[in-house]
Image: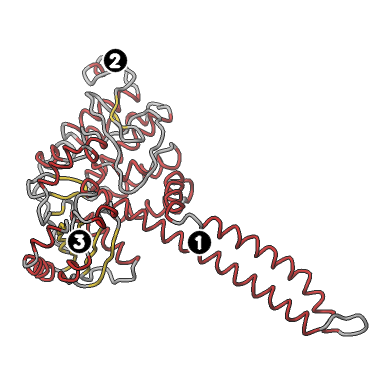
Amino acid sequence: MAIAPFALHHQLLCFPKPTAWIPNKIHLKSQKGLRIFLTSSSSPSQSETEPQTAESCVNLGLSLFSKGRVKDALTQFESALALDPNPIETQAALYNKACCHAYRGEGKKAAECLRTALREYNLKFSTILNDPDLASFRALPEFKELQEEARLGGEDIGYSFRRDLKLISEVQAPFRGVRRFFYVAFSAAAGISTFFTIPRLVRAVQGGDGAPDIWETAGNAAINIGGFIVLVALFLWDNKKEEEQLGQISRDEILSRLPLRLSTNRIVELVQLRDTVRPVILAGRKETVSLAIQKAERFRTDLIKRGVLLIPVVFGEDRRPPMEKKGFGVPAKGASSLPSIGEDFEKRTQSITAKSRLKAEVRSKAEIVSPNEWERWIYDQQKSEGVNPGEDVYIILRLDGRIRRSGKGMPDWQQIIKELPPMDALLSKLEK
């Protein structure tokens, strides 16, 4: 949960790579989500005898939060903000305070803290996306509003987030900048030509000695004006497409963080299954999803050969088990399985040993964790595709985690078997 009062370089937000985590004893998280030692050796016990500082309050708040004393931790973070903290300590206190509010289900208060940290204290939006302790907040409407502000870069909220999205967008559409240059250059040329053509057209209409030919002048004016309008329209259309692409990249980033429970009861983020399986999300009413899974059983062997992993998402069905109110707000078993804590990302996702072990745990179906997060992502995806939120849909992902295709209703399994190559085929290797 915690964020450290230390400034580190921001890691490029790029689907589908999560950030790395380094465990230590007393810790706060930095911009990259790294858990590191504080500069001082203060501890909760020492804070009782020594004068309070903003840093000691943040430390004590973290210790209290880890013990499930969220209310007391919130008091410590508020005290840190009242002790004239430096900007980095303020950022840490605001972020951790937001995590407390998120744990308590206070979405508006959490959003206010995060908005202030983003706008005034250089918090990176990717930290909010990557932190498992903000999973409950990411399922709330307040997060959607904050994310939209960050995507648009309004009021300096998430400027770096939008910049990183644009970098990814430029990689996916490398010639957009070149097109825009020509749109602007040719529009300027057409505008300048029109500026000189209009007076000639007026003289041609008035007639008289030395007046230019009216038909030739009118034709030139029409070409210039028409070209200017077309080029401006193309420029605006390209801008609209870029915004749509940025929205999709942002949704892909959120999708990569959504948690799953494998058949072995291990909880992983979807990104950890990259290059291992082709997830097929089945979302809709319980009857429809159940029927689709039953039909898939007839083709189980062929689907497994193609790396298909079924992910059922039943709308309106909250499968979260009762949680004991302690720690970071997740069940004890779940907390020990969460992939973002205590593991290095490169070891998690690139180690051959880890990959082999993960493949052994993956079966034909996985269970979603945090249903609200999954449903909100699907609703957002449906809106972007022009589908009424709540309709039955399926979404097929590639081995590299990107969306392959989607559609209304449930998939035709025979068609999917024909479409998807086996995992050991050359086409599957090229897909990774």
For the residues carrying marks 2 and 3, which lies nearer the camera in this image?
3
Nearer to me, 196 or 84: 196
How are the residues colored? secondary structure
Q: Residue at x 77, y 74 (%)?
A: 198
Circle 3 residues within 10 Å: few <14, some 14–19, many ≥20: many
Q: Please indicate whether residue 116 sits to the left or right of residue 206 in the image.
A: left
Q: Amino acid at mark 1?
A: Asn
Q: Please indicate whether residue 81 sits to the left or right of residue 198 in the image.
A: left
Q: Earlier in the sequence, mark 2 or mark 1?
A: 2
Q: Position of residue 5 (x, y in %)?
A: 36, 28
Q: Earlier in the sequence, mark 1 or mark 3?
A: 1
Q: Residue furthest front?
A: 426
Report how many numbered discs are placed on residues in the image. 3
Q: Amino acid at mark 2?
A: Glu
List the residue tagged with mark 2: 50
List the residue tagged with mark 1: 239
Q: Position of residue 201 (x, y in %)?
A: 79, 79
Residue 297 badge:
none
Q: Tell me the CA gap for discs 2 and 3.
A: 54 Å
Q: Tell me the CA gap for discs 2 and 1.
A: 57 Å
List the residue tagged with mark 3: 281
Q: Position of residue 23 (x, y in %)?
A: 23, 28
Nearer to me, 336 or 71: 336
Indicate the quadrant where residue 26 lies: top left
